[in-house]
Every structure is written in C-alpha cells, then in structure tokens.
Image: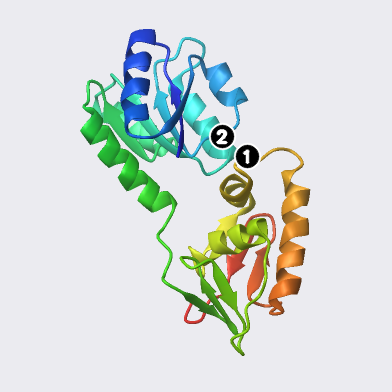
Amino acid sequence: MRILLVEDDNRFADALMVALRRQSFDVSRAATAAAALAVPPADLVLLDLGLPDMDGIEVCRRMRAGGEVAIIAITARGDERDRVIGLRSGADDYLVKPFGIAELRARIDAVMRRVRPVARPAVAAGGLRIDVARHLVTSGDGSVIALTRKEFELLAALARRPGLVVSRERLLIEVWHSPWPGGQRTLDVHMATLRAKLGEPKVIQTVRGVGYRLVADGT
C-alpha cells in the first residue's frame, strides 16, 4: 500500500518513514502543502496540520475535494475543537503526537477497512456470478467470461461495494492508481467494453456526474 507522509519536521518524518517501511508500506514524503498537492495520489495520506506554506486543514479539504483518498491527520493539536475541525474537513481519523507505531498501524488498518470494504466471497448480479477472490466471472449457463486485467479490476471495484455508487475518481485510483487528466476517457472506454463482454447491460448503472453502481441481487 502506498502512503504519502506530509510532514515538514525532518527528524520526525525520517523516523516515521523508517518505521512504516518496516511494516512493508511503500512510503513517500512531501515537506510542504504545495508538494503534497502536486504529487500523484496515494492510497493513504498521513497529514501534518502544521505545514509551513498552508494550513493543514485547507490541504485536507483540497485533497478530499480531489478524490476519495484516505486521510489521517497527525498533529500536535490535541484540543477537541481542532479534532472536530480536522474530521469535518475530510480526515478519516485524527492522531495526536506523540504516538506509537502500533497505534498508527491500527488506525491505518481501521481506516482502510472502511475505505476498501472486504468483498463477499461471490456476488450475484443478474445472470452473472462475480467471484473477486478467485478472479472469476461466470454467466448464467456457467461459462467463464474472459476479461482483461483492467476490466476485471474495474468490475471488482464495483463488486466490493454491491449496490453502492463508486465515484469515477475512486475507480481511477483503485484501477489505474492515479486520477490523471486523460483517465476519464480511458475509464469510459473500459467500462463500455466491460459492459459489452458481460452481456448484462442493466447490471452496471451509470450515476451521471458521480460514477457507477453494480446492481447486485438483493441490493
């Protein structure tokens, strides 16, 4: 999992990056708000609120407006008012310095469980059966539907949240790992091809201006 650490304190950042890499995370760092907002999005952002060029609350708002990246605020601001403001600005969690790596890991795991729900063993949708764990899609007669890797990842991202709308930005992040400017057209092309291969046009609904929903049985 890719983590972006936004922290201007070099000593603290270096120590935290070493600890996170020992936990097998892929960690990069930005020391300023400008740098953090310029880099490609990660799976999770550890965001210091006391940055030198912009208040971390504003950075949090901008990150949240730009996509559905998970954000944990890490800060010395421990007052209840600051925690409330941070959470209302879009942070998924709020951790006050100093903290231990075990607590941080527990917070990361909890946040990512909410952001990336665990898929059901298999999801039935119309005449389809989508087995994310086995990387398998079958039609009503039991025949296997052949999908490319990206097509399956796109379908799996929807199948993990049956009945819920998944934003276009979230799909780009999960499947292509970056909501780059040309990604919207790429998403549309892959979605059209996926729908054609599935042969069930009503199974994936378009929610205009937002994203897509998998209409699973029972949802």
Local crowd size for mark 1, using a 10 Å CA cut-off: few (<14), some (14–19), many (≥20):
some
Q: Quadrant of the N terminus?
A: top left
Viewer-nearest residue: 97 or 159: 159
The image shows residue 21 at horizontal and vertical percentages of: 37, 28
Across the whole image, how many numbered discs are drawn on residues?
2
Residue depicted at x 55% and y 71%:
136
- CA distance separating discs 2 and 1: 6 Å
Report the disc number at residue 146: none
Amino acid residing under circle 2: Pro
Is 11 rendered above or below residue 175? Answer: above
Displayed quadrant of residue 200: bottom right
Report the disc number at residue 178: 1
The image shows residue 61 at horizontal and vertical percentages of: 51, 32
Residue depicted at x 37% and y 14%:
14
Q: Is 132 left or right of 114, judged from the image as shown?
A: right
Amino acid residing under circle 1: Ser
Is 55 rendered above or below residue 191? Answer: above
Residue depicted at x 63% and y 46%:
176
Q: Which element is circle 1 on? A: loop
- Name which of mark 2 and mark 1 comes first in the sequence: 2
Is 26 rendered above or below residue 110? Answer: above
Q: Are marks 2 and 1 in contact (CB under 8 Å)?
A: yes
Residue depicted at x 39% and y 16%:
50
Q: Is 160 left or right of 106, judged from the image as shown?
A: right
Displayed quadrant of residue 71: top left
Is 190 rendered above or below residue 144? Answer: above
Residue located beneath label 2 in the image: 41
The image shows residue 86 at horizontal and vertical percentages of: 38, 31
Q: Which element is circle 2 on? A: loop
Q: Is 36 left or right of 198, judged from the image as shown?
A: left
